[in-house]
Image: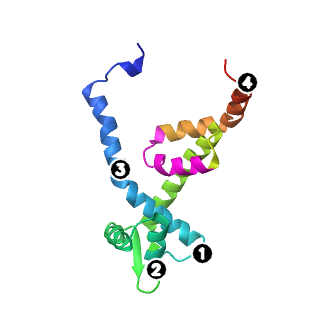
Amino acid sequence: MNSFDILPDAETHSEGFRANRAARQNVLVEDYVELIADLLDEGQEARQVDLAERLGVSQPTVAKMLTRLTDEGFVARKPYRGIFLTPTGRILAEEVRNRHRIVEAFLLALGVSPENARIDAEGLEHYVGAETLAAFQTAINAGLSKFMTNARNKGPL
């Protein structure tokens, strides 16, 4: 029997579920803010139609989320000029980007294909905690990619 077979106490057990629910509530906000930052940083305008196309959702869905993002202080909208991030929105976008970069680099170091690493990082970035991110970064810095390459070359034990 290992530690995965033992049910933790109720407080410890519920903490994981609480963290997951909190992350789920922020996923959409983070996705929108990150995409807006990406578009703006590439010199493009962030428009409702662009967000809808890239996120694969309808324009009314984007409009509803933009109202929420405006109300929560992450974006500012200017008629005929698109969508802009507020300083608070820019900070959030950078935090999300940093998490994404670390998770994607970790997956790549494990040997995950670039396409799958990008796709999986897009989901995992919202759920990974600070301690885990730090551990990912430590593993990357310590040569995880080289270790994994050597392990793959040696084959099964």
- Residue that mark 3 sits on: 24
Confirm whether residue 99 shows in the render.
no
Q: Position of residue 94 (x, y in %)?
A: 51, 58
**Residue depicted at x 40% and y 75%:** 76
**Residue depicted at x 35% and y 69%:** 61
- Residue that mark 2 sits on: 82
Whether residue 74 is situated above or below residue 14 in the rendered picture: below
Whether residue 149 is situated above or below residue 93 in the rendered picture: above
Residue 149 shown left or right of residue 82 in the figure: right
Q: Distance between the residues labelled 4 and 1?
A: 46 Å
Q: How far apart are marks 2 and 3 (CA)?
A: 27 Å
Secondary structure of the residue carrying numbered label 1: loop
The amino acid type of the residue labelled 3 equals Arg
Q: Distance between the residues labelled 4 and 2?
A: 53 Å
Q: Position of residue 120 (x, y in %)?
A: 52, 47
The amino acid type of the residue labelled 4 equals Lys
Q: Where is residue 132 in the image (x, y as percent from the top left)?
A: 49, 37
Which badge, 1 or 2, is on the more N-terminal residue?
A: 1
Q: Distance between the residues labelled 3 and 4?
A: 40 Å
Which badge, 3 or 4, is on the more N-terminal residue?
A: 3
- Residue that mark 4 sits on: 154
Q: Distance between the residues labelled 1 and 3?
A: 30 Å
Image quadrant holding the N terminus, namely top left
- Which one is closest to the eye, mark 4 or mark 2? 4
Residue 126: say if magenta: yes
Q: Residues within 10 Å of mark 4 (few under 14, many from 20)?
A: few
